[in-house]
């Protein structure tokens, strides 16, 4: 809910400021954004961020997989404990 509210406030603020500043201000901001996006330093940072994100995703996937394996083994162990064993006839009625 908070995220939606912040989005709406940001959108409204952008609309109001954009409409008052006019098309020229928008064009200047847009040109600067395109210039920054094409900058080799910006692309290097983006590439590094992608690598970090991929590595973090790989680590998270390994941890989740390990956790699932341990959970499955634990559940199977508990199922074996709860399942009655066959009567071997060693006790009297």
Image (spheres, rainbow, N blue to C red):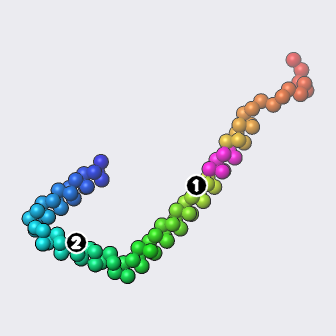
Q: Position of residue 56 (x, y in %)?
A: 52, 65
Check whether the beta carbons of the residues at disc 2 and disc 1 lie within 8 A of each other: no
Q: Residue at x 44, y 74 (%)?
A: 47
Image disc number at residue 21? none
* N-terminal label among 2 and 1: 2
- Locate the C terminus by quadrant: top right
70 inside magenta stretch: yes
Q: Is residue 61 left or right of residue 41?
A: right
Cα distance in 3D space between marks 2 and 1: 42 Å
Q: Residue at x 89, y 20 (%)?
A: 92
Q: Position of residue 34 (x, y in %)?
A: 28, 74
Mark 2 neighbour class, 10 Å CA radius: few under 14, some 14 to 19, many 20 or more: few
Q: Is residue 45 above or below residue 73?
A: below
84 inside magenta stretch: no
Q: Position of residue 6 (x, y in %)?
A: 25, 55
Q: Is residue 53 above or below residue 3?
A: below
Q: Is residue 82 left or right of residue 25?
A: right
Q: Residue furthest top?
A: 93
Mark 1 neighbour class, 10 Å CA radius: few under 14, some 14 to 19, many 20 or more: few
Residue range of the region highlighted in magenta in the rendering: 68-74
Q: Is residue 6 left or right of residue 72?
A: left
Identify the secondary structure beneath mark 2: helix
Q: Is residue 81 left or right of residue 47?
A: right
Nearest-to-viewer mark from 2 and 1: 2
Q: Residue at x 45, y 75 (%)?
A: 48
Main secondary structure along the magenta-highlighted residues? helix
Q: Residue furthest bottom?
A: 40
Image disc number at residue 30? 2
- Quarter of the rendering containing residue 7: bottom left
Q: Which residue is mark 1?
A: 64
């Amino acid at each position: 809910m908070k995220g939606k509210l912040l989005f709406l406030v940001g959108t409204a603020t952008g609309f109001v400021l954009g409409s008052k500043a006019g098309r020229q201000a928008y064009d200047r901001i847009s040109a600067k954004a395109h210039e920054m996006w094409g900058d080799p330093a910006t692309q290097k940072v983006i590439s590094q961020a992608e690598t970090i994100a991929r590595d973090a995703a790989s680590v998270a996937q390994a941890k989740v997989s390990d956790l699932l394996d341990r959970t499955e083994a634990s559940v199977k162990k508990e199922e074996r404990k709860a399942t009655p064993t066959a009567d071997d006839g060693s006790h009297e009625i």
